[in-house]
Image (cartoon, grey):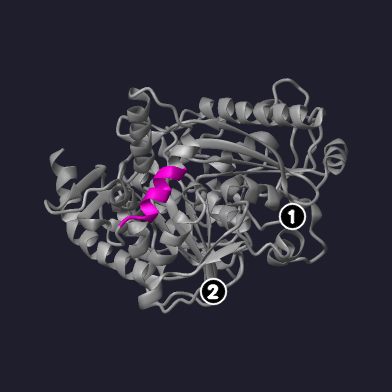
Amino acid sequence: MDILSIKSDIKEGRTALGIEFGSTRIKAVLIGSDYSPIASGSHDWENKLVDGVWTYDLSSVWEGLQDAYAKLRESVDASYGLPLTKIGSIGFSAMMHGYLVFDKDDNQLAEFRTWRNTMTGEAADALTKLFSFNIPQRWSIAHLYQAILNNEAHVPSISFLTTLAGYVHWKLTGKKVLGVGEASGVFPIDSETCDYDGTMVDKFNVLLAQRNLPFKLTDILPTVLNAGDDAGTLTPEGALLIDPTGTLEAGSPLAPPEGDAGTGMAATNSVAPRTGNVSAGTSIFSMVVLEKPLEGVYPEIDMVTTPTGKPVAMVHCNNCCSDLDSWVALFKNVIEAVGAKVSTPALYDALYFAAEKGDVDCGGLLSFNNLSGEPVAGLDSGRPLFVRKPDAKVTLSNFMRAQLYATMATLKIGMDILFEKENVTLDTLLGHGGLFKTERVGQQLMANAMNTPVTVMATAGEGGAWGMALLAAYRLNKADGEKLEDFLANSVFGQNAGSTLAPIEEGVKGFNDYMKSYKTALAIEKAATESF
């Protein structure tokens, strides 16, 4: 789109804004009427381990939102010479799951417990048996039930339970709602009704009654909305929370708040059956839209939904690029120690391209990237760990290839269940997130690891914030009765099929050989968590 058209979109409010609260970055992406990004802004933040709980202060939510938006506003001004006052539609998304609870006076009752915590094993196991449906530890309902089992004092005072995306949306609109995809990580969803599963709700209410708690489950959960539904408008108070300068006008319609899984599906045009995507950043997860329900119940597989309620098999792994990022930072320190300079993006590219030249089995090197627990691999806690055999081929290429293999190893464990036990068929996987920013390398290794073609689009680096902007645009611009998959396929992506790399037979075999060693050596990782 030419600059005059972009300026017209900004002046007339034909834009959509998506803001996503990721694990390490809050990103805002503004798109024009052709759905392409025209400006962005971001804010770095980090979770904290406080008294054994991975958390963020809620004050940092607003500080980060305001900083990311201010940078986006400054970008608009610098690029187009215009103030950003009127936005056509807005949507907020965030890392899914977790636990945010408030009393009847809107006071926060407990620290924000993020998806990264692995403290709800007892509750998750009990609910999985009760529902005959896998309830992962990070799901909001597992956190609630664990708090009940722990007899935590705040539980009887709960008036509202939500996620980070739901919290932000609530404060900006006054609406206690969630998009169905985000809601599917709070409590199981019935895809026929696109609402919380009624049978399971009744079973949980029995547990609440047994504890004499003064509420029923649906009394405290957000209302479930479908993509495109009316989720309220930005209030004057909400506009000031985003932009304290008072420049941003109230009244913009908001899309239902979604999770990073749903925005990943939108950003990769993978919301229809036989499509799937892999989101790879701080965590890594795959989303596979199913043609039919799974026959089995697997602790490694979460059943969630698309933003329109279609059943999705999700393999979620807590750890992906964080350990790799630490090694890249170390290499940069070495370079700077000898008086040289290199930009961080250039260093990532150089190290990724080095990995491309490594032995397909990493030459006897193994890396475990677990900063935190990893339920898919049976780990309650994590220790980043690099090991090698005495006769291993210790080269930069093999080392970096092992680091990249580590980012996708646990994902492979879960995906093999879908491929081998459930005979799930995929036409392609769409890759997005930081792992795919360097051209070709992460994409090819992922194709080899999953033995499935992997497609990456030019927008892969934009990630979930762009996907949320698309959902906001769908809320505003969809035709009567137009399905999300049709809107994305026809209006957004069109002929932009991206670039696809097929698996290479030698690479597939090399990754499988690596995985044999990796699974055997998980005993080393477990011992490290017990000893160090």
Asked if residue 518 lies left or right of residue 473, the reply is: left
- Lower position in the chain sequence, tag 2 or tag 1: 2
Q: Residues within 10 Å of mark 2 (few under 14, many from 20)?
A: few
Closer to us: 298 or 39: 39
Q: In this picture, is 3 found above or below 106? A: below
- In the drawing, what numbered circle is on residue 474? 1
Kind of residue at badge 2: Asp
State the image coordinates of residue 145 (x, y, percent, origin top left): 38, 49
Residue that appears at 39% across and 51% down: 142
Examine the image and state in which quarter residue 340 appears: top left
Under mark 1, the amino acid is: Tyr
Query: Residue 13: percent from the left, percent from the top?
Result: 84, 40
Q: Quadrant of the C terminus?
A: top left
- Relative height, residue 66 to residue 114 (above, below): above
Q: Which residues fall within the magenta stretch?
A: 349-358
**Residue 445 pos. (x, y %):** 41, 60
| Residue 291 locus on image (x, y percent) | 54, 76
Name the residue: 60% across, 46% down. 462
For the residue pair 324 and 50, the one nearer the viewer reads as: 324
Give how far apart the Cα atoms at labels 2 and 1 are: 25 Å
**Which residue lies at the image location 52% right of the left edge and 34% below the top edge?**
103
Determine the main secondary structure of the stretch shown in magenta.
Answer: helix
Determine which of the numbered discs, if any, sits on residue 427 in the image. 2
